[in-house]
Structures are given as structure tokens and as C-alpha cells.
Image (spheres, rainbow, N blue to C red):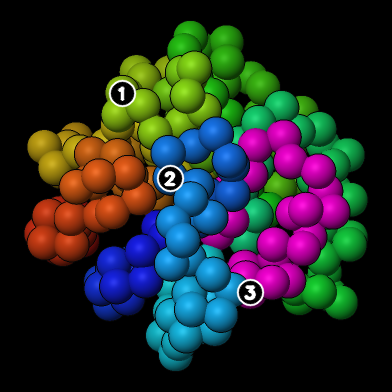
Amino acid sequence: MRNAGNIHEVSQLDIDLMGFIFFPKSSRYVLGDPDFSKLKCCKQVTEVSGMPEKVGVFVDEMPQNIITAVYDYGLDAVQLHGMESRQLCENLRRTLDPDICPGVKIFKAISISEPADIDHYKVYEGAVDLFLFDTKCTTVGGSGRQFDWSVLDRYDGKTPFFLSGGIGPEDVDRIKSFKHPKFAGIDLNSRFEISPALKDVSMLRTFIKQVRS
């Protein structure tokens, strides 16, 4: 998300988290929109009462830049979508909590193209609050493509996870029938966009209502 009006509309839906991508090479880069500034978006839009928790998405970013973004944009969680180490995850938490962002959550994306990729979670078990299993692609997410969810039968970790990667309006029944003891939610992005970072509010509203019913 990065458009102020779109952020406000989507924040009124029955969602728990909202993502802001701080990766300059992404077509959804928050600072790629001249209207997205600390003053306009963060102070007037993203800190309103009832706002979903704000997740900053970073890809192999310098730790100091992540910490600055958390502080400047009032982020509630950090999602690491690159090749970040376990040590970086642990150091971020120690730096941010409690002085800068009490209770900050750390998410780690795991890119999947084959069953063995699932096992990469073991590097981070106990160091992060949530895994996000996404489709491996050259664009670092946002590909609109799904991976084979059946490979998640292999996941036997203790950390909850989100399903991500190409989830679209036609996947309601598939999501509702997906079962795993650590399945905690879904990540919606490219399949609900009018253009990069601009969400179709009506489509999201209908989909969320159907999934939650």
C-alpha cells in the first residue's frame, strides 16, 4: 500500500495487517509515490484509530535503515523477504523492543519452489514470530503465481505461518479447505490490484467476506 486514499479505504475492511514495501526495486515501493511522505501518510493516515497493524517489508536491507523506517512510520512488524540471517532477526528484535517499538513482531518470508525449500524454516525457528510461505520468483514476491500448497505437509515447526503467492478471488473454497495446525492467515496482493500498490477495494471486500463466512 502507498496511496493515502486507498490505504484509508482498505483499512476499513476486516483485515488484521497492512503491508508497506520498503524495497526500492519493487513496483510497489512506498516511496515511489510522491504523495507517500512521513507527514501525509504516516501521521495523517496510518496512525488513525482502528488502523490495522502496519508491516514494513524489507529485502536484504541495512539494519539501521529498517530501524529508522520502524521509528519514522510507526511500524508494528518487520517482514524480511530476502536472505537475512537468523542473527539479524535476533539483533533487530533486541534493538527495537522495547525502546523503539515495544512488542515488535518479526516475520520471515520463505520462498518455495520445491518441497525441500520448506526446511529452510529451521534456520529461523524460535527467532521470528511468523513465517510467510511465498512462491519463489525473480521479482522477490508479487509474482501472482502460486506454489503447491501440499508441500506444507512437510512443515512441522512451532511457528505460525501465512500462505502467500498468487492468492486470488477464485481461491475462496481452496483456502477454507486448507488445513494445517500452524496455518494462521493469508497474504493478499497482486491478484487484488488495479495497478501496483493500488488495491481493488470492492474485490477485497467481497473476498474477505466470503473467506470469513
- Relative to 131, residue 106 above or below: below
Neighbours of disc 2 within 10 Å: few (<14), some (14-19), many (20+):
many
Q: Residue furthest front?
A: 34
Q: Quadrant of the C terminus?
A: bottom left
Along the polypeptide, which appears first: circle 2 or circle 3?
Answer: 2
Report whether residue 149 is seen: no
Query: What residue span does the magenta drawing correspond to?
Result: 55-76
Q: Quick one: label 1 or label 2, which is nearer the N terminus?
A: 2
Q: Residue at x 82, y 69 (%)?
A: 97
Picture coordinates of residue 142 (x, y %)? 39, 33
Nearer to us: label 1 or label 2: 2
- Using residue 24 as the reference point, say whether residue 3 is left or right of it: left
Specify whether residue 24 is in view: yes
Magenta stretch encompasses residue 178: no
Q: Which residue is found at the position 74% from the left and 54% from the top?
A: 66
Give the CA separation, mark 2 to mark 3: 19 Å
Q: Earlier in the sequence, mark 1 or mark 3?
A: 3
Q: Give the numbered dot on residue 74.
A: 3
